[in-house]
């Protein structure tokens, strides 16, 4: 989870352009699995995100064999990694359904006007409360190591400080945000989880690019620029011991300096982020139990007396 830094949090200082859809299939060689150095295991992924190349993130993040297993699990609906690393999560199918429903933009605008418009102060107070809850949760939850906790606390502080100043209930921004998200979702051509399974991971992530870009544009409306954050990131290998390494990562998020250390591991001569490998493995269904060995032939019945 750690690298894509709150990942990548989806905003940009200015609208980003999608990858060139006019390029002929096969005209560009696929990006390699893994990175040449531990620090490149971070910086290569960030470069893909700056290009809006979501499928390249998945390819670079995993060795070929694990990438193929996750791809296969996508097609059966049993994995949706790396959507938990990117600005998508388990709620994505429901989000796609809401954004692509008939008359979605009008309905969502009506809901925003009824529930959120003009409620900036209340939303900022809620953000403050969520920030406190998030840090308390990190203190209780046992699944995070000390480095992850330190990183996530910095992220929570930065995001909470931003949200407490952002014009979250502004009617004009709300209307523009809904327009961008509905348009982005429509351009994906996706309606729900079945489409993601049909496409598989590589094609599914490519299809999601317009929604990813729309998310970046929306947060830009509220003053949060992730493209600026990604551009600020610097990665430095600080220790290598055999097939393991520590990478120091520094970047600026919402005017806050973030400084953390990430773990990288070497697999078949290439470097990968340890958290990504663990999360991808955890997303897969358990292996099928082995078929029982053939039963030995029953012994012949003893001869009659």
Image: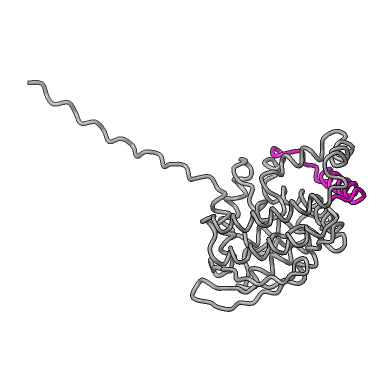
Name the one closer to the observer, 154 or 275. Answer: 154
- 172 is within the stretch colored magenta: yes
Q: Is residue 23 visible to us here?
A: no
Name the one closer to the observer, 166 or 86. Answer: 166
Q: Residue at x 90, y 46 (%)?
A: 175
Name the one closer to the observer, 97 or 288. Answer: 97
- 114 is within the stretch colored magenta: no
In the image, residue 203 above or below residue 297: below
Please name the colour scheme applied to the rendered image: one colour
Q: How many marks?
A: 0
Residue sitting farthest toward the top: 305
- Is 109 left or right of 288, judged from the image as shown? right
Quadrant in the rendering for residue 33: bottom right
- Image quadrant holding the N terminus, namely bottom right
Magenta span main SS: helix
In the image, residue 98 above or below residue 148: above
- Is 83 left or right of 15, judged from the image as shown? left
Q: Position of residue 15 (x, y in %)?
A: 87, 59
Q: Position of residue 234 (x, y in %)?
A: 70, 74
- Image quadrant holding the C terminus, namely top left
What range of the chain is rendered magenta?
169-194
- Is 82 left or right of 282, judged from the image as shown? right
Q: Position of residue 168 (x, y in %)?
A: 83, 52
Residue sitting farthest toward the left: 305
Q: Is residue 160 visible to us here?
A: yes
Q: Residue at x 70, y 55 (%)?
A: 86
Residue sitting farthest toward the right: 172
In the image, residue 261 above or below residue 216: below
Q: Position of residue 194 (x, y in %)?
A: 69, 37
Quadrant in the rendering for residue 54: bottom right
């Amino acid at each position: 989870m750690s690298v894509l830094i709150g990942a990548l949090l989806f905003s940009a200082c200015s609208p980003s352009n999608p990858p060139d859809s006019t390029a002929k299939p096969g005209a560009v060689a696929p990006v390699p699995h893994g990175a040449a150095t531990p620090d490149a295991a971070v910086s290569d992924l960030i470069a893909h995100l700056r290009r809006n190349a979501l499928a390249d993130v998945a390819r670079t993040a995993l060795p070929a064999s694990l990438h193929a297993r996750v791809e296969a699990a996508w097609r059966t609906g049993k994995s949706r990694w790396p959507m938990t690393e990117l600005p998508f999560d388990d709620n994505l199918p429901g989000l796609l359904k809401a954004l692509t429903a008939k008359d979605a933009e009008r309905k969502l605008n009506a809901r925003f006007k009824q529930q959120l418009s003009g409620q900036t102060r209340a939303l900022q107070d809620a953000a403050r409360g969520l920030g406190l809850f998030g840090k308390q949760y990190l203190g209780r939850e046992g699944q995070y190591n000390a480095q992850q906790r330190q990183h996530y606390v910095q992220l929570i502080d930065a995001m909470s400080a931003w949200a407490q100043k952002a014009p979250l209930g502004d009617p004009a921004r709300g209307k523009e945000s809904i327009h961008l998200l509905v348009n982005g979702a429509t351009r994906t051509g996706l309606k729900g989880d079945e489409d993601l399974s049909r496409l598989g991971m590589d094609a599914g992530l490519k299809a999601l690019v317009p929604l990813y870009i729309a998310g970046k544009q929306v947060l830009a409306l509220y003053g949060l620029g992730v493209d600026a954050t990604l551009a600020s990131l610097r990665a430095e290998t600080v220790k290598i011991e055999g097939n393991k390494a520590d990478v120091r990562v520094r970047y600026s998020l919402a005017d806050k300096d973030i400084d953390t250390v990430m773990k990288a591991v070497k697999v078949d001569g290439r470097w990968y982020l340890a958290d990504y490998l663990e999360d991808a493995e955890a997303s897969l269904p358990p292996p099928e139990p082995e078929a029982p060995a053939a039963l030995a032939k029953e012994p012949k019945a003893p001869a009659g007396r």
